Image: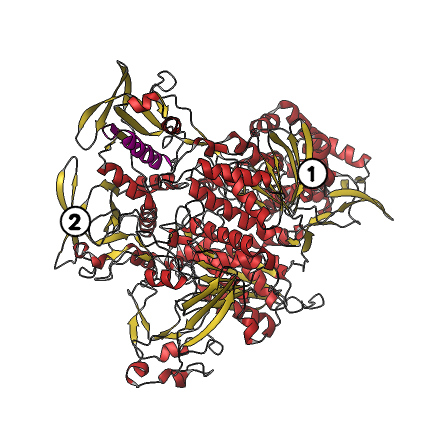
Amino acid sequence: MCTGRVDLAFILRAFKQGADGVFIGGCWPGECHYVTEGNYDVLKNVHIAKKMLQRIGINPDRLRLEWISASEGMRYAEVMNEFGKRLKELGALGKGEGIDERSLKLRMEAAYNLVPFVKLVERERIRERFKTEEEYDAYFASAELESLFDNLVTDNLAVSQMTLLLKEKPLSTAEIASALNLSAADVNRHIKTSSRKGLVKYDEGLNAYALA
Amino acid sequence: MNTAERNIGDVLIVGGGISGIQAALDLANSGFRVFLVDKSPALGGKMSQLDKTFPTNDCSMCIESPKFIECSRNPNIEIITYTEVDRVEGEAGDFKVTLTKKPRYISEEKCTGCNICVDYCPVKIPDPFNQNLSENKAVHIYFSQAVPLVTYVDPETCLYLKEGKCQICVGACKTNAIDLHQKPETFQIEVGAILLSPGYSTFDPKLRTDFGYGKMQNVVTSLDFERILCATGPYEGEVLRPSDKKHPHKIAWIQCVGSRQVTPGGNNYCSAVCCAYSQKQVILAKDHSPTLEATIFHNDVRAYGKDFERFHQRAEKLPDVRFIRSYVTVGREIESSKNVTIRYSTVDQGVKEEEFDMVVLSVGLNPPKDVEALASKFGIELTDQKFCKNNPYNPIETSRKGIFVSGAFQGPLDIPESVLTASGADALVGQLLSHRRHKLERERVYPDEKDVSKEELKIGVVVCYCGANIGRVVNIPEVIEYAATLPNVSWAGENLFACSTENAKQISDAIVAKGLNRVVLAACTPRTHEPLFRDTCREAGLNQYFFEFANIREHCSWVHSREKENATEKAKEIVRMAVARAAHLEPLQEFQLPVDHTALVVGGGVAGMTAALNMAEQGFEIYLVEKDNDLGGLARRLHYTLEGTEIQPFLEDLVKKVYRHPSIHVWTDSTILDVSGYVGNFTTQVESQGRVREVKHGVSLLATGAAEYKPTEYLYGENENVLTQLELEGEIVAESERVKAAQSVVMIQCVGCRQTDRNYCSRVCCSQAIKNALKLKKINPEIEVQVIFRDMRTYGLKEVYYREAANQNVKFIRYEADKKPVVEAQGAGFKVTVPDPVLGQVMELEADLVVLAAAVIPSEASQEAGKLFKVSNNPDGFFQEAHVKLRPVDFSADGVFLCGTAHYPKHLTETISQAYGAAGRAVGILSRETVTASGSVCDVNENNCVSCGACITACKYGAISFVDTPKGKKAHVEPILCKGDGLCNAKCPTQAIYLKHYTDDAIFAQIDAALH
């Protein structure tokens, strides 16, 4: 098994289950034990996961990827101690970010449910392969990628959360907006697109939106 | 099988230490039937007594003991312990060997290793395995992981055998295994070849009264200290001193005890391993007690091996560690404290006497005990130092045909060299006996695998103490109690050492008796022990993929040794995760892949040629690819060895044999373009003399060599009278005018290495300097030769030539790394200035020629080969072997092997040994019809597949393609092409493709269990 086997779902599942941090250790780039250089795949996944975390208000520092070869026991110990220290500074997941438990659960659930979709986005729109770690870093820091990610993923994260909320009970626009900490305009936009897809409907009797 | 048949085999191995064990496994795996004989009650040799091994600090027993069990389970290895050789008759191909099995006073067939007799025995004796530092009984098992796991009675101390009294043990034994009337048993075996791997004995410091050993309680030998450090040692891994069993705060190590001495009772050679093992002991002792003050009194620090330089630096940088270059004398024992004083002198402070709580004598390596009797029984010759006399062009050959030698009987060697010479012996035996390969071989038979698919989950959890390694930190009973409460766990129990034969059997018995269908072992690490326990499951008729490891030693007790409660909690969590995962394990079948009986050898130097010729002689087809236009490599520039053997005639002969061999295809002027495939079935594209050709081969052997560093320092390249040692060697042989006319030569060591950018020692240069200095003295006895050095690293038997050079008035001047010599042109010659740290003044030397010991650097070809064959190079650019100690010529990629200077700088004889070693390992695959591939490969759940093709683009092995099914186009995995990296899984949006054994469900279960 290679670090490239580390599925986006593994990372988000761990956070969903309440992990305060997730650490991934991989072989150094260029020292692949297979021929696949799957460490670049995990690098890409970690960039994507960090962006998702950030968009649901979780500090992306809670996810760390380091290159550590089997012979670098000392380095491993240093990195883990340092990461442990950083996590203590950040505090418990959610608490550190000032997110209440219910909202945290909702956000994590939404992000986790989005994994199959994000995999498709990755395949269709974020296909680029680079030769160095720096190029990946630069690419994922670019404005172009940010806006692509916002267009494709951020809105869907909100919709995913909204759907989870509406699963519990029908809600008004204002209620949704306050629960998800969004503007009414954004909520209206998401309701509009979701209604068009037949996911959400307006329940006149309740004067609220419900799942279709 | 009848007795007559049972006594016929292919090879007799004498000595069951790590070298003999490795040889037995390699020989058995390449189709020979082996007798593995040891005179002690169990396999293991000296390695089993060591705590950890340098430079990786792996636990010695932990990496060795799986091999004991591997030997005992191999149907082609017969282990015969407590047995000595009486007589050898016959000749190569047909030896008759008479052996005598000493009476153990125990029936090996009946003894279960239960230890009850040991409990009842009233006689306490010093424990030989623990260097007499603790007590055992007159009847005991040699050590916990012993193979065979049976007791033996010490005839010297047993009351019955001495005085006819007692016999308590006889009554206590439930299986009537004790037979105090047992007699020696003499029998004869027939073999085609013999391998001597009797190992070494340690220097006995009692012979020299001046070390205080045996008189002062707190003076111990380094082997004693290994036991003291060890969790299974006399003090259960607490570093205590013998006099009062208190923690010593100040320990001194004295180097070169018994070594590098010409005084009577000492050895005139260097023992080659003590510098590194003492540094290891310092690191480990500091680990036990961080405030310990450690002082090492040393001569030259000989950090000449791979990664030794960094290891030395690691020890040196620890707080309160002093390395003091000084001869010492042991002073006196202080009556009240039992402390010991040591007198030494330093440049700054003159002579001092200092008190230490404990003193460790770094004792050297001697030839095995009774070596002369051994030599005469086998009819082999010994060297002056009583080591085995070997063929200088083939160190594994003794003076008698058909009898080979591996390990430290060749001379002081460390573990990797003992292992690779063992594999080399396999190669040479294979060459001698290739006609009888597979003739006596027997297949291992496992019980039928039981079908558990209809059963409910019954998980068994075994928690191992690992002696004190885990037990001292983690509360094992608490973990067991907890494990028993976990879902689907039907039984939880403990093991003192799960890896001992007895406990491994307990596990397989428990599988049968308790009807377990999943097994979780909470113990050391899957890295070294997973194959062993998978095999244990197979022995019990359970599919091996039903085994799961919970790593509570390396992931827990070792790293949290100071937080016992937290460590126990973490151990529970790790076990909980493993149990959760075990519930999702499925039975898997492994694949048998056909093997192409052809080898590709890359590099036509001595290493590549030696390996190629050996494999060809064993009956395999070889392609030898060389980038230059002729064979020979770096050895073309070497003319004689330090020991005085001629190189060029040997090389010519080797080249000729390789070119002429009908099974070797030599391709010169060739470059490798591409490598694909896997063990047993590689395909390589080679561009050779303008044509691209394709080779199909089962194994690859990389011998891409090394290069000489081109110095930029000391006027090299600016002044033609500055040469490298290799250039000087060429000129000596060519009898150049300037060499003949030279009146004075200054040699400068460590040029281009042992520095920040090349943080390693080039190993060969000190010997090279001595060799050339002696030649110069021979040409002109009046010549002044001065060697400016940092540490003279004429390790092992090469030491005698260093002394010879000093006797011939070659001058040696030491310099410090930060005060390098300065070379200036002066008249027709040079002025060389260097601060002498001993005399404390700047020396001014005159020289006609300046000769630089230029570093050995990795070849460019090694970098390229690393990328092509997907194998690693270490930070210095040399090849990285799979395991520094026990897999020294394997890469972690299966079917790819390494040898020669591409691994690390080494002498020609070492290169030859390693080439045979690599050939031996490679033939282990070539001689088989199939290799086994892991069952952990991908498969597709077609119902979930949406035909997006994400998996197909992710797979670099081309293992996935679309196939037409009634449900449409679906992804399909070709299992023999799948390497199980699992990249495709992470890409699949619908979880349709899954990696067996590492499924999403199994991993999710583990994640969920971790966080609940």
In this image, B714 relative to B145: left or right? left
Mark 2 surroundings: few (<14), some (14-19) or many (≥20) residues within 10 A: some
Foreground of the two, B11 or B700 = B11
User: Residue B880 location, x and y as percent?
Assistant: 50, 41
Number of numbered discs present?
A: 2
Three-letter residue code for mark 2? Thr
Res. A37 visible in picture: yes
- Residue B218 appearing in the image: no
Residue B825 percent location from the top left of the image:
28, 15
Relative image position of residue A198 (x, y in whole percent): 82, 39
Task: Kindly identify which numbered label has been placed on residue B329.
Answer: 2
Q: Is residue B903 left or right of residue B821?
A: right
Q: What's the magenta region? A: B764-785
Which residue is at 41% across, 55% downward? B60
Residue in view at x 44 percent, y 73 percent: B150
Question: With respect to residue B427, does B669 lie above or below?
Answer: above
Is residue B774 left or right of B32 when viewed as pictured?
A: left
Would you say B212 lies left or right of B283 here? left
Give a yes or no on whether discs 1 and 2 share a subunit. Answer: yes
Question: Circle 1 sits on which residue?
Answer: B954
Where residue B80 sits in the image (x, y, percent)?
Answer: 46, 69
Check the residue under mark 2 and report the chain it is in.
Answer: B
- Circle 2 — which element? strand
Up-down relation of residue A94 to residue A138 (above or below): below
Task: Specify the farthest residue to the right.
Answer: B966
Single out the residue that lies furthest toward the top. Answer: B827
Could you give the CA–CA distance between mark 1 and mark 2, rounded to whole angstroms?
67 Å
Q: Is residue B478 above or below residue B247?
A: below
> Which of the 4 quarters of the picture holds residue B789?
top left
Any magenta on residue B781? Answer: yes
Q: Is residue B499 highlighted in magenta?
A: no
Chain at tag 1: B
